[in-house]
Image: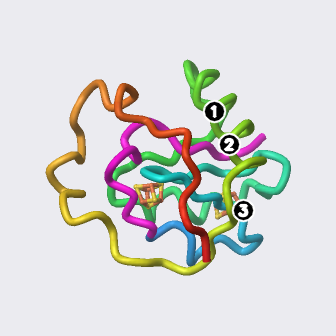
Amino acid sequence: MTYVVTENCIKCKYMDCVEVCPVDCFYEGENMLVIHPDECIDCGVCEPECPAEAIKPDTEPGLEQWLTLNAEHAKAWPNITVKRDPPADSKEWDGKPGKMQHFSPNPGSGD
Ligand code: SF4
Ligand code: SF4
């Protein structure tokens, strides 16, 4: 089992999650974060910390697409453990439908 970051992180990227993870398994893309499924110890601490409610346990149904996206991009993106300021327009994007069309495969800057 692992926790996964899902669609509502895209363009919100609040980053409250990274500072609570005991094993530092968040990785940063240009406009969202992902969790490395082989490093996550399923502690669940990050889930309530996400203001966008974008972090889910993979035991929830229908998350296959997000599990694959997290696993693939965690291998390519840089590790992030320190929270930075979120994008200026984070709140405007929170809860918007269809954010996957805005997903960027490009890496973020990491720590
Ligand atoms: S706190 Fe939530 S919205 Fe922010 S980066 Fe983490 S998963 Fe994404
Ligand atoms: S569930 Fe725990 S180990 Fe997994 S990403 Fe969240 S804080 Fe890190």
75 up-or-down from 88: above or below: above
| Mark 2, other Cα within 10 Å: few <14 / some 14–19 / many ≥20 | many
Say whether disc 1 or disc 3 marks the residue closer to the N-terminus.
3
Residue at x-position 59% and y-position 65% = 45
38 up-or-down from 88: above or below: above
Q: Is mark 3 within 8 Å of ligand 2?
A: yes
Q: Position of residue 6 (x, y in %)?
A: 49, 38
Q: Residues under labels 3 and 2: Cα distance?
A: 12 Å
Closer-to-camera residue (51/26): 26
Disc 2 designates what residue? 73
Location of ligand 1 given as a quarter of the image: bottom left
Q: Nearer the viewer, mark 3 or mark 2?
A: 2
Residue at x-position 57% and y-position 21% = 61
Q: Are marks 2 and 1 in contact (CB under 8 Å)?
A: yes
Q: Is residue 8 magenta?
A: yes
Task: Please give the label number shown on residue 69.
Answer: 1
